[in-house]
Amino acid sequence: MLQLDISGRPQAWISPREAAVLYASDAVAWTLGSTFHVMRGGYQRTTGLQSRIDVHPIVAVRGSVPSRAWRQAPALSNPKLFARDRNICAYCGGHFHADELTREHIVPVSRGGVDSWMNCITACRTCNGFKGNRLPEEMNLALLYLPYVPSLHEDMILRGRRIVSDQMDFLLASVPRSSRLHG
């Protein structure tokens, strides 16, 4: 389940059980999407009815503090970097399996480059080895695409979870049209 703050900003991916606790404690302000999961509990003595919680794929939490994560750059990891770059080498343009890819620093760390979204791209092992600790222009290499810092909504997609269509539609609606995630 995708948990949002009251203003609709993503906060976290939560389990159906965690979502059920939010429903049961009346902490859900609003939901989006069709019922995704049904949780059943015990039977009431007086009515004989079984308790039931319909969990939606997107829940906004009442009383939660608006997320500050949208103001910060998301954490950089190889899986998210490769997903941002769609598993395409920025030098040769080949599409590779994650096992054949590397995190490539445009300005090598050994030459003062930093490990950041704006200095890292996806490269195949061959191209990364060819470039070594040199700048792309020193090796006559041109970037086929430019790096960028993913937004909070993009970061939620890049985390590699199994995202249902209601969640993906919600997240993609706030992803810039220029993002490679739309391709």
Image: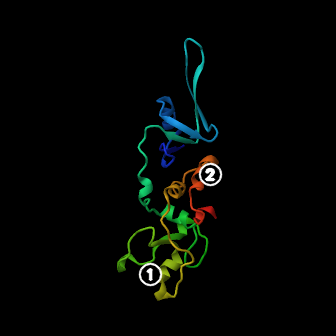
Residue lying at the far front of the rendered structure: 7
For residue 49, above or below residue 119: above
Q: Amino acid at mark 1?
A: Gly
Query: What distance separates the C-alpha of mark 2 from that of mark 1?
Result: 40 Å
Q: Amino acid at mark 2?
A: Asp
Q: Position of residue 43 (x, y in %)?
A: 56, 18
* Label 2 vs label 1, nearer the camera: 2
- The picture quadrant where one finds residue 33 is top right
The secondary element bearing badge 1 is classed as loop
Describe residue 34's horizontal placement relative to residue 102 as left or right. Answer: right
Q: Which residue is denoted by mark 1 in the rendering?
A: 132
First of labels 2, 1 by sequence position: 1
The quadrant of the image that shows the C terminus is bottom right
Describe residue 9's horizontal placement relative to residue 170 as left or right. Answer: left
For residue 160, above or below residue 35: below
Q: Position of residue 25 (x, y in %)?
A: 46, 30
Which residue is painted at 55% across and 51% down in the image? 161
Q: Nearer the viewer, residue 19 or 67?
A: 67
Which residue is painted at 64% across and 39% down in the image? 34
For residue 46, above or below residue 120: above
Q: Which residue is denoted by mark 2 in the rendering?
A: 169
